[in-house]
Image (spheres, rainbow, N blue to C red):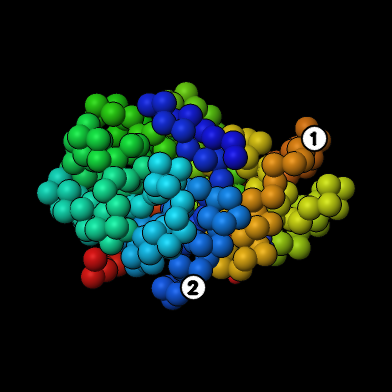
Amino acid sequence: MEQVTLHNGVEMPILGLGVYQVEDPAVCEQSVLAALSAGYRSIDTAAAYLNEEAVGRAIKKSGVPRGELFVTTKLWIQDAGYESAKRAFQRSLDRLGLDYLDLYLIHQPFNDYYGAWRAMEELYHEGRIRAIGVSNFYPDRLVDLIDHNEITPMVNQIEAHPFFQRTADQQLMQQRGVAMESWGSFAEGKNNLFSNETLCAIGERHHKSAAQVTLRWLVQRGIICIPKSVHQERIEANIDIFDFSLTDEEMAQIAAMDTGRSSFLSHYDPETVSWLGNVKYDI
Ligand SMILES: NC(=O)c1ccc[n+]([C@@H]2O[C@H](COP(=O)([O-])OP(=O)(O)OC[C@H]3O[C@@H](n4cnc5c(N)ncnc54)[C@H](OP(=O)(O)O)[C@@H]3O)[C@@H](O)[C@H]2O)c1
């Protein structure tokens, strides 16, 4: 597995499994176990996914040594703030059954994320988290956070897929030393991504699917991916992307698919900000 070296020297697998919208604990456990036996070593969960316990159980059952794993979880909006972030971190760790995290992310750029960041900086210095980062931070808030705090986020996990490619954002993150991680690498199948003509035609030449071409294209851009699937054969297929390369022409063909717009939501729309901020979990 290729690794991305974060700005503090920690190595993060370039591909992992995401478990958003995997609410059934048995299905979540099964998916994580399937991924670990297929060779995945990175798992991306969140307090808001309500499945940290299932992820923890699968990790334990797998028998994979903790030191080989890279576990990410995220702090939800309701727990932003210095004290509440510290408490939420400990609750996540307890649910996962772990004594340290590899990566802890601020899930959304809302509420008191400054307070949360200071708590995370401390936890990082205490060695309880190997890397700290953010998610869904557009360039303005990312630069603000970087410029007024001690630690630059090691990762920013953002929506990125063939229909929303984030090329300029990636450039800015590169300049600032922040690794880019894609969520929704398949746009959750929106716009018929899995049967897209361009992706399928490229796939045919390499004997790969549109899904595999999409992941390969992201990985070739140096972007960390965490595709989600609950099906063993898809989990196995999604990691089978390291035996081929896309040509410059193929990369350019996919680059032409960019719409420059989110396929999901706008973090600048006041109604969306208010709606997200009011999503509360018993966590
Ligand atoms: N930070 C954030 O705000 C944020 C937001 C969204 C997601 N995420 C993270 O990013 C991860 C990935 O994003 P996502 O789950 O939203 O969507 P995604 O990975 O773009 O797409 C997942 C969808 O694609 C299907 N799929 C997966 N592999 C496939 C294949 N090889 N062929 C055909 N269909 C396939 C899955 O179905 P099956 O499961 O039925 O196979 C599922 O419906 C999440 O799980 C989560 O960890 C983070």
In the orientation shown, which residue stands out farthest toward the right?
205
Residue 162, can we see it?
no
Q: Is residue 174 above or below residue 56?
A: above
In the orientation shown, which residue stands out farthest toward the left?
83
The earlier-in-sequence mark between 1 and 2 is 2
In the rendered image, which quarter contains the C terminus?
bottom left
User: Of 137 and 11, which appears nearest the observer?
Assistant: 11
**For the point 73% across and 49% down, which residue is it?**
213
Q: Secondary structure at mark 1?
A: loop
The residue where tag 1 is placed is 247
The residue where tag 2 is placed is 27
Label 1, label 2: how many angstroms apart (C-alpha)?
A: 37 Å
Query: For this view, does 21 lie left or right of residue 213?
Result: left
User: Residue 86: horizontal and vertical position, in percent?
Assistant: 17, 48
In the orientation shown, which residue stands out farthest toward the top?
175
Which amino acid does the dot numbered 2 rest on?
Val
**For the point 49% across and 61% down, which residue is it?**
32
Q: Is residue 196 above or below residue 171?
A: below
Query: For this view, does 243 lie left or right of residue 186?
Result: right
Q: Is residue 194 above or below residue 132?
A: below
User: Residue 269: horizontal and vertical position, in percent?
Assistant: 39, 56
Mark 2: few, some, or many residues within 10 Å (few <14, many ≥20)? some
Ligand 1 - quadrant of the structure image: bottom right
In the rendered image, which quarter contains the N terminus?
top right
Query: For this view, does 2 lie left or right of residue 269?
Result: right
User: Residue 106: horizontal and vertical position, in percent?
Assistant: 32, 47
**For the point 45% across and 43% down, which residue is it?**
68
Q: How many marks?
A: 2
